Amino acid sequence: MVLNRSIKTNHLIFILLIMVLPFCLFANNNIKPNIIIILTDDMGYADVGYHKILQDNRTPHIDALAKNGVSMTAGYATAPQCTPSRAGIITGQYQNKFGLDENTDAPLPLNIPTIAEKIKLNGYTTGLVGKWHLDIHPKNTDWLNKNNFDDINSVHSEIHFKYAPWNRGFDKVFCGNGSTVWTNFNLDGTTYTEPQKKIYDQYRLDLQTEAALTFIKQQHNQPFFLYLSYFGPHAPLSAPEKYLSKFSKDMPNRRRLALAMNTAIDEGVGRIMQALANLHILENTIIFFVSDHGAPLILHKEDAPISKRKNLWNGSLNDPWLGEKGMLTEGGLRVPFVVNWKGTLPENMNYHIPVTCLDISATAVAVSGSEISDLDGINLIPHLCGEKEATTREAIFWKWRGQEAVRNNRYKYLRYSDGKEYLFDLESEFHETNNIIENNIEIAEQLKQKLDSWCKALPNSGENKPLRKSEKIFRGFYLK
């Protein structure tokens, strides 16, 4: 009788081990998985169906990615603007550490290594498709003056190319926001010894999907890293009828166009997942899906004519969070964020502990086989597999123009350069609609000290820029 119980107990333990072991098999056996980062542009938190916030989305493939993986419900960008956010992702470091605080601070300094360079050292073929946005900014007068150029037009191509992705760790590039790209491979699989300028007659989001599929099919027999940077639903808003027809003409036109663009991205995600399955590499591929920051609402979500392109709502939404692109409130920073690794990570899991896009970089580098001690993110795999209970970090920090913020656990401290301060309980039903600083001075002071310490280590010694008129207007509108 005792023997039977022992056999049953051992049998149960064996079954449990069989169930648990696959979740971290790749992480523990030094098998190099393929790595795909899918980045969208200006996509709001409410723009994906799996968040179940709005009913007008059509993103079944992205939803399946979340259902079959892990949804990071408190996933953050490192900045509420394109270039600094992308600099954080592509380097794995807070971009403020090397002075790239906003768009006009580009280019990405040549002495800052990219994660593509780190991953490449481990035998990976690296590829970029879509938007780069880390080259020389035409309004970066400091860089131009330092390098003895009168203006951006006097910078010759050899200098520009130093900052191009093919010189920043990417073997294969299909670089461009629209139909005009710099590429060293064609959609038919032809490769070029040097990047060439090509013009395609194809809808930009579909073109980026096709290029990604070409790269995957060419490289599937060896480990690869693909950074697929969709230029959507960022303006200029456009979509072919096959996507527009899925949405009613009764809704605001800008919302309809944004949803159509998101559907184009979603169908691209579906085609990529199908290609991975057909090539029998789905279970050996870790996929990250994330937006670079929240959507620009421009306060009132005006449905302006599409012919107007500057400083207008792109049709995306950040519900239920407060604020928008260009703000360090949740609407500007909290984004759709999914991690999927079939057979290794859990399925249908909501992870509520705050994480950042820097963790995508650190995880990608870690699973490729490199150390991440010089990066600012953490490897998410042990936490998502259950080997560690929660992410262990002191806090998450932000600094952008005249705004600075820190989140630690449930609390977020936000301050502006004119002295206004806020403390929010992000796990309360009021989140950022209720400033609780007056009744929680001690908590605010603790967070303020963390933020001060972090800012003092930055190149500008923590100096904060004065608020622009538009930033004061945005704050007055949202943080009443």
Image (cartoon, rainbow, N blue to C red):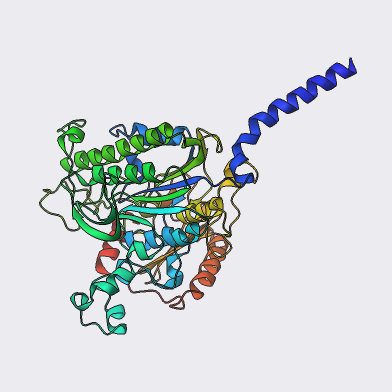
In this rendered view, identify the residue nearer to me: 99 or 183: 183
Farthest residue, direction right: 2
Q: Residue at x 41, y 31 (%)?
A: 278
Which quadrant holds residue 64?
Answer: top left
In this rendered view, identify the residue nearer to me: 301 or 1: 1
Q: Residue at x 23, y 49 (%)?
A: 314
In this rendered view, identify the residue nearer to me: 339 or 190: 190
In this rendered view, identify the residue nearer to me: 105 or 305: 105
| Placement of the C terminus among the 4 image quadrants | bottom left
Compared with 213, 19 (above or below) is: above
Residue 151 is situated, as x and y percent measured from the top left of the image, at: 20, 78
Q: Mark yes or no: residue 220 visible.
A: yes
Q: Mark yes or no: residue 106 visible.
A: no
Residue 5 is situated, as x and y percent measured from the top left of the image, at: 84, 19
Q: Residue at x 35, y 38 (%)?
A: 269
| Placement of the N terminus among the 4 image quadrants | top right
Residue 233 is situated, as x and y percent measured from the top left of the image, at: 26, 47
